[in-house]
Image (spheres, rainbow, N blue to C red):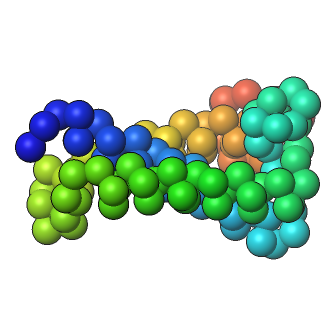
Amino acid sequence: MGWLILISYFFGGAFLSNAIPHIASGSMGRAFQSPFAKPPGQGLSSATVNVLWGVLNLAVAYLLICRVGDFSLRSTVDAASLGVGFLLIGLLGAHHFGRFHGGNSPGETNGGR
């Protein structure tokens, strides 16, 4: 298996992880940060924009995972590559969005709140 395929699965996991908070927030009718807000990634975008952004992330994840190579959940290497991408973007999102939503642990900055 080529390393390029594993990189594709890694980024597929990252896009999959990024889709979740946008689709969830948007589906609940809540505004949430997105790249289309002002300032990008800090301001709030509408629930509709977040659902659309989340679904686009989901579509990219599908392309990177299901249409590149022959992804198998039974393959430890495939699943680990996807899982590491999912985990890293999840942790980055927790840190970034925690500044705005009070989710960071004590002692971390909370965006001036």
Is residue 42 at all visible to an observer of this figure? yes
What residue do we see at 69% from left, 42% from top? Answer: 98
The vertical placement of 65 against 105, above or below, is below
Front-lying residue, 9 or 20: 9
Q: Is residue 66 above or below residue 5?
A: below
Is residue 105 shown to the viewer in this render? no
Image point (25%, 46%), residue name: 81
Q: Position of residue 9 (x, y in %)?
A: 31, 47
**Which quarter of the rendering shows the N terminus?**
top left
Q: Name the side, left or right, on which 11 lies relative to 101.
A: left
Residue 48 is left or right of residue 83, and the answer is right
Q: Establish if 104 lies above or below 76.
A: above
Which residue is rendered at x = 61% and y = 37% of the image? Answer: 95
Considering only vertical position in the picture, is 34 above or below 53? Answer: above
The quadrant of the picture occupied by the C terminus is: top right
At horizontal 87% and vertical 69% (from top left) the residue drawn is: 29
Q: Position of residue 30 (x, y in %)?
A: 86, 62
Q: Kindly indicate the quadrant of the structure image that contains residue 96.
A: top right
Image side of residue 112 versus residue 59, left or right: right
Q: On the image, which quarter does residue 54 sit in? A: bottom right
Q: Please provide percent x and percent y for residue 55.
A: 64, 61
- In the image: residue 46, left or right of residue 77: right
Count up the numbered dots: 0
**Of all residues shown, which one is farthest toward the left?**
1
